[in-house]
Amino acid sequence: MSAKPAFIIDVRSPLEYANGHLEGAVNIPYDRIEQAMQDGRSHGDVAVFYRTNAQSRMLEDMLLRA
């Protein structure tokens, strides 16, 4: 990772995000993350906050394809 802070994406639902999230995190729900990436939301290093291991595996595959 670079010295520049990572872009933090919280892929939980808007309700889960509203109940508490990491400072600086941007809420892009999992079901919209692929479209957001295609729209050019690339910020170098990316950190992702998720709820389950299944989500993390699917998101990892998606990020590697991007």
Image: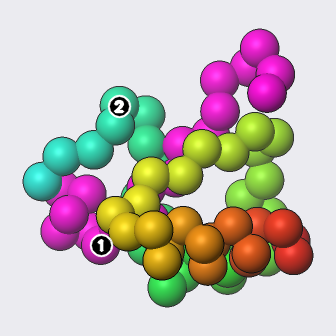
| Residue under the point 74% across and 76% down | 62
Q: Residue furthest right?
A: 65
Q: What residue would you read off at disc 2?
A: 23
Q: Judge left or right: residue 36 versus residue 15.
A: right
Q: Secondary structure at mark 2?
A: loop
| Residue under the point 60% across and 72% down | 57
Q: What residue would you read off at disc 1?
A: 13
Magenta stretch bounds? 1-18
Amino acid, disc 1? Ser
Q: Which mark is residue 22?
A: none
Asked if 32 appears above or below 40 in the picture, the reply is below
Amino acid, disc 2? Glu
Asked if 3 appears above or below 20 in the picture, the reply is above
Judge whether residue 11 is colored magenta.
yes
Q: Position of residue 30 (x, y in %)?
A: 48, 76
Say which quarter of the image contains residue 39.
bottom right
Locate the N terminus and report the quarter of the image it occupies: top right
Q: Residue furthest top?
A: 3
Q: Secondary structure at mark 1?
A: loop
Evaluate whether residue 39 shows in this view. no
Tag 1: Cα neighbours inside 10 Å, few (<14), some, or many (≥20)? Answer: some
Q: Judge left or right: residue 52 versus residue 35.
A: left
Say which quarter of the image contains residue 21.
top left
Q: Position of residue 50 (x, y in %)?
A: 41, 60
Q: Judge left or right: residue 31 versus residue 35.
A: left
| Residue under the point 54% across and 67% down | 56
Compute the Cα span from label 2 to label 1: 16 Å
Reading the chain from its start, which is encountered first: label 2 or label 1?
Answer: 1
| Residue under the point 77% across and 14% down | 3
Tag 2: Cα neighbours inside 10 Å, few (<14), some, or many (≥20)? Answer: few
